[in-house]
Amino acid sequence: MSNLPEKLDEILGEKMYKREDRKLVQDAFTRLGVNPSSTFIDFYTQYEGPFWEENQPFELLDVIDEENNVETYTNISRQEHDFPNKYLVLSEMTANAVLVLDTDTDKVYKVNFEGGDEKLLKGELRESWSSFFEFLKAYFNC
């Protein structure tokens, strides 16, 4: 049984989205010091981004591929905004905001840098999606 939404493979069925080297993703999680949910791991070990959906204002980054990726943006946020290791930045900045995964709770947040980042760090920001699974369903409309 898959940890991913049922229709996701239909949506991302093209060869360009199929991950070739899954070990590189696990290596990135090790470098980042995170242990994300099985849904997050399954998604990024099966699929390679970046991903763009018309119904979402955010480009969902790949973990390791391309210059701009989850690992790069997470490291920048850790250095510049003091994000703790449990947070992964999943998108490029759009309208001064990013998508952030809390790897401890699996919740996904829309975080703006006009006070939302401070609320996130204080534990006061309400999640946008209760889990990465729910985020995938909304993002890919499946």
Image (cartoon, helix red, strand yellow):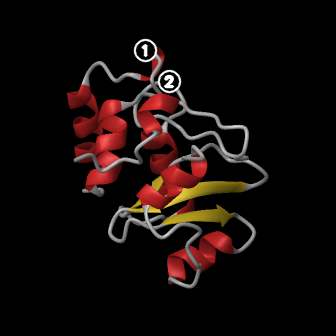
Q: Is residue 34 visible?
A: no
Does residue 140 appear in the picture of this structure?
yes
Q: Position of residue 20 (x, y in %)?
A: 30, 18
**Three-letter amino acid code of the residue under disc 2:** Glu
In this view, the residue in front, 44 or 64, is 44
Outermost residue, top side: 15
Q: Nearer the viewer, mark 1 or mark 2?
A: 1
Q: Quadrant of residue 37?
A: bottom left
Residue at 52% in and 83% down: 122
| Residue 15 disc label | 1
Q: Are marks 1 and 2 in contact (CB under 8 Å)?
A: no
- Picture residue at 52% right of the left edge, 26% below the top: 67
Seen from the viewer's position, the closer of residues 42 and 22 is: 42
Secondary structure under badge 2? loop
Q: Residues within 10 Å of mark 2 (few under 14, many from 20)?
A: few
Left or right relative to 16: residue 35: left
Q: Is 98 or 6 nearer to us in this picture? A: 6
Residue beneath disc 2: 66
Looking at the image, residue 15 lies above or below residue 106: above
Q: Residue at x 56, y 65 (%)?
A: 109
Which of the marked residues, 1 or 2, is nearer the chain's N terminus?
1
The local crowd at label 1, few if under 14, some if 14 to 19, many if 20 or more residues have their Cα within 10 Å, is few
Query: What x and y, as percent, mark residue 33?
Result: 26, 54
